[in-house]
Amino acid sequence: MKCLVNFITRRKNGNISTKTKEIEADTIGIGRATDQEIFLSDLRIAYKHARIVLFDDEYFIKSRALSGIKVDNSITSSVKLEIGVKVLIGNYQLTVIENSQYDLAVEIEQVSTTDTQDEELKIESKLDLNHTKLNKRTLSWIGFSIVFILFFIIPLLTSLFEPAKEISKKIPVIPSDISWKSGSLASVHHFFKDDCKTCHEKAFIQVEDQSCTQCHKDTHEHAADDLMVTENVNEIQCQNCHKEHNGKEGMIMASTDNFCSDCHINLKDTLGDQTQLLDVSDFGNDHPEFRVSIPVIKFGQQTVNRISLTDTEKLKEKNALIFSHKAHLNPDKPEKFVELTNNGTDKMVCADCHRPDSGGKAMQAFTFENQCQSCHQLVAGTKENPLNLPHEATTEVFYYIQQYYKALALEGGVPDQRAPASVRGRRRPGQSISPQERLEALEWADKKSNEVALDIFNYTLCKTCHQINYSENSTPPWNIKDFKVPDVWMPNANFDHGKHTTMECVDCHNVNDSENGSDVLMPAIASCQTCHSGAHDDDLLATGCIDCHSFHIGENLLGTEK
């Protein structure tokens, strides 16, 4: 039905104001509840007092309250709504008026009553403690005593005395110390959720670090002692950051960035001018350029240099490895090389060599056997008797070469015109050779081994990828220059390749034009900031400190005596 309702208000000065409301509904509710279509504010009226309904093409108002409705000073439960009919509901009079544009039109006006009557009605409608003839102080002490006994004394007894705790388990209605629990535990601690003493070893004392380290034995301090000019960081208690009883995922404090930036925003003031750590407060607008860890080997000892990606002069990898990404990614390489790619196409791709580890987070460490051998096979010797060389130190490679040619020389039948007749000649099975022939064969084998080794180390196999040092004082005189390929470029950062599979490798690593093995091809911070920003950014992916960095990275374990 479509109904028009005019609310009439008469002012003391004689003016009349009208507020109009249009209602379209199958049933129109009337009452003191705010969800009723016609809201009437009067204590005499029930929350859902009456409703207007359509029945056999006629409109009726039906009472839903026991007090009913009043028509012509008579209380009734239902009345047909015709033009001119007046219905009294509480202190409001509903009058049906004529309006051809609506199915039903009514005027509602509050019938005037004396202020005294209204005030008396309000007073009678209120119920306070005085009506119960009970004393407030007595009730307060009774309530306090009940709560104190049920939720302090009894739980305290169950906490201090094991027999009391066993009784509380058998009689569930008796509260135990579990009633003190302020919230559910994190999911990792659910296995001891009913044993409060696992963490709360002392009653009414905050959880101490030793309670945590009983299980978390391998947790390290935040930083090395020589970095901590102030002692406050390593002295921070576990519960300052890790808050329990906050639900399944409530173990890490929410304000992590603020916690970090309090110290890291001005490290020179905290650690002194000698610190090499850089100030940072927000990844989006106050984070230094990334620094990579480049291993350097001097006099057989390995050190690590941390170099900023903006320092182009020092940003070179000291690995003594001859390698070109551009050559390997060139689609015009020889056909025999193309056939060995792992992806089944005529072009090598990054995944042919760079393969994720079992967790999908980092990349596997490079080895010759896994990444190189399928294309670069270390084969020497003759076509009839090939020698597969190991990818090992020059001493072992040279040993393989020597043993190979000694075996050939002693077996005979070597097709080398420069070899002595005893080496070139074929021998029948079981035929022995004289001591002189054996000496000649071994001398030729030594000479041939040195010739082949010179070719392998200086011109063909090894020289292709490695820098070779020559020294007449060593045996063999060739040595591969020491180098170390970094497994992790940024050891103080956590990066997950598995979460970036929607990106192409070249989106972050500029490898297509790299022709030198010393090139460092790690992405700068600007590359990350195209998608990531600070923890409070609403436009990009919000990234906080703990998204990329760990806190417990010190050398000493928590609780270690110094």
Image (cartoon, grey):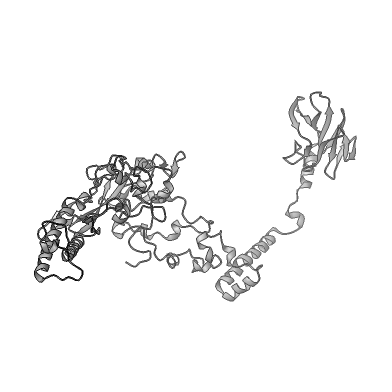
Name the residue located 86 percent from the left edge and 32 percent from the top edge.
57
Quarter of the image containing the C terminus?
bottom left
Left or right: 166 with respect to 518? right
**32 to 9, vertically: above or below:** below
Left or right: 299 with respect to 557? left
Name the residue located 84 percent from the left edge and 29 percent from the top edge.
96
Residues 307 and 253: in front is 307
**Where does the image place residue 528, in percent across and percent down from the top left?**
38, 42
**Where does the image place residue 163, in percent across and percent down from the top left?**
59, 76
Report which quarter residue 400 is drawn in. Answer: bottom left
Name the residue located 35 percent from the left edge and 66 percent from the top edge.
560
**Which residue lies most toward the top here?**
100
Residues 6 and 192: in front is 192
**Where does the image place residue 145, in percent across and percent down from the top left?**
65, 65
Residues 16 and 319: in front is 319
Residues 151 and 136: in front is 151
